Image: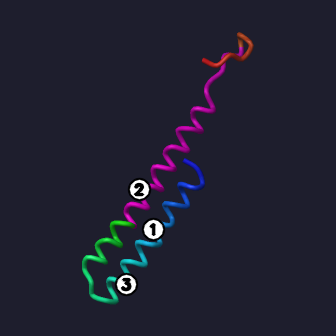
């Protein structure tokens, strides 16, 4: 996941917050719930992007065997 995924997660969070605020202003409980759900969705996407980036980084730092010309293990 790259920068686009992080942007999409942030977009979901912002849209969710706006929807929640509109729901609060209009006393629409379903809009409030939808807004909070969108914020959670954005947070989950953000965490998934972080985990995938971390796993990708770890995969790129694989141990190499220096005794045999640096071949990857």
Where is residue 54 shown, x and y percent of the image? 54, 42
Gap in angstroms between the C-alphas marked 2 and 1? 10 Å
| First reached walking from the N terminus: tag 2 or tag 1 | 1
| Circle on res. 48 | none
Q: Position of residue 63 (x, y in %)?
A: 62, 24
Q: Quadrant of residue 66?
A: top right
Q: Position of residue 68 (x, y in %)?
A: 71, 10
Query: Which residue is identified by label 3?
Result: 22
What residue occupies the far top of the structure in this picture?
68
* Spatial separation of the CA atoms under disc 3 and disc 1: 14 Å
Q: What element does badge 1 sit on? A: helix
Q: Residue at x 51, y 60 (%)?
A: 8
Check disc 2 and report the residue beneath it. Answer: 44
- In this view of the protein, which residue sits in the foreground, 56 or 28? 28
Q: Is residue 17 left or right of residue 8?
A: left
Residue occupying image coordinates x 27% and y 83%: 28
Image quadrant where one finds the C terminus:
top right
- Chain part drawn in magenta: 39-66
Is 58 magenta? The answer is yes
Pointer 2 or 3: first along the chain: 3
């Amino acid at each position: 996941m790259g920068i686009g995924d992080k942007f999409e997660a942030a977009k979901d969070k912002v849209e969710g917050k706006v929807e929640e605020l509109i729901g609060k202003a209009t006393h629409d409980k379903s809009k409030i719930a939808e807004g909070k759900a969108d914020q959670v969705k954005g947070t989950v996407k953000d965490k998934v992007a972080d985990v995938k980036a971390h796993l990708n980084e770890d995969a790129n730092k694989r141990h190499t065997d220096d005794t045999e010309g640096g071949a990857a293990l």
